[in-house]
Image (tube, rainbow, N blue to C red):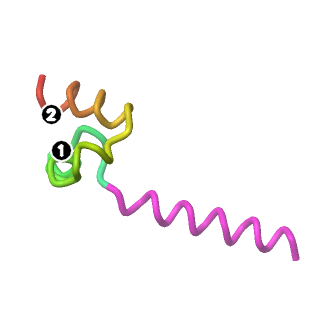
Amino acid sequence: MTYFKLVLAALFITGLSACSPEVGSQEWCDALKEKPKGDWSANEATDFAKHCIL
């Protein structure tokens, strides 16, 4: 029963990550531009500067 729950959780997490655009893609840059800058993580800010500005 526990094994089943772990597999189900792994599939759920994998499904969520498949829906987000790839970091550095135009879709990702556009989505981050719409997100309030106060909600950006340090990694998002660094990736945005690296992929969307430079």
Instruction: Name the mark on residue 42.
Output: none
Residue lying at the far front in this picture: please name it: 38
For label 2, the crowd category at 10 Å Cα-Cα, with few meaning under 14, some 14 to 19 and many 20 or more, is some
Q: Does dot 2 land on a helix, a strand or a loop?
A: helix
What is the tally of numbered marks visible in this picture? 2
Q: Is residue 9 magenta?
A: yes
**Do the CB atoms of the residues marked 1 and 2 lie less than 8 Å apart?**
yes
Q: Position of residue 12 (x, y in %)?
A: 57, 69
Apparent side of residue 42 relative to residue 27 in the rendered image (left or right) = right
Q: Residue at x 33, y 37 (%)?
A: 44
Q: Nearer the viewer, residue 14 or 54?
A: 54
Q: Which mark is residue 29?
A: 1
Q: Please report the bounds of the magenta region as a residue range.
A: 1-20
Which residue corresponds to mark 2? Answer: 52
Image check: 15 left or right of 45?
Answer: right
Q: Is residue 11 above or below residue 51?
A: below
Give the structural element (helix, strand or loop) at label 1: helix
Residue 11 falls within the magenta-colored stretch = yes
**Figure check: 28 above or below 51:** below
Q: Residue 23 sits in which quadrant?
A: top left
Name the amino acid type tagged 2. Cys
x, y (%) of residue 2? 86, 70
CA gap, disc 1 to disc 2?
6 Å
Compare marks 1 and 2 and give the one earlier in the sequence: 1
Most extreme residue toward the bottom is 1
Q: Residue at x 72, y 67 (%)?
A: 7
Where residue 48 sits, quadrant-wise, is top left
Give the residue type at disc 1. Answer: Cys
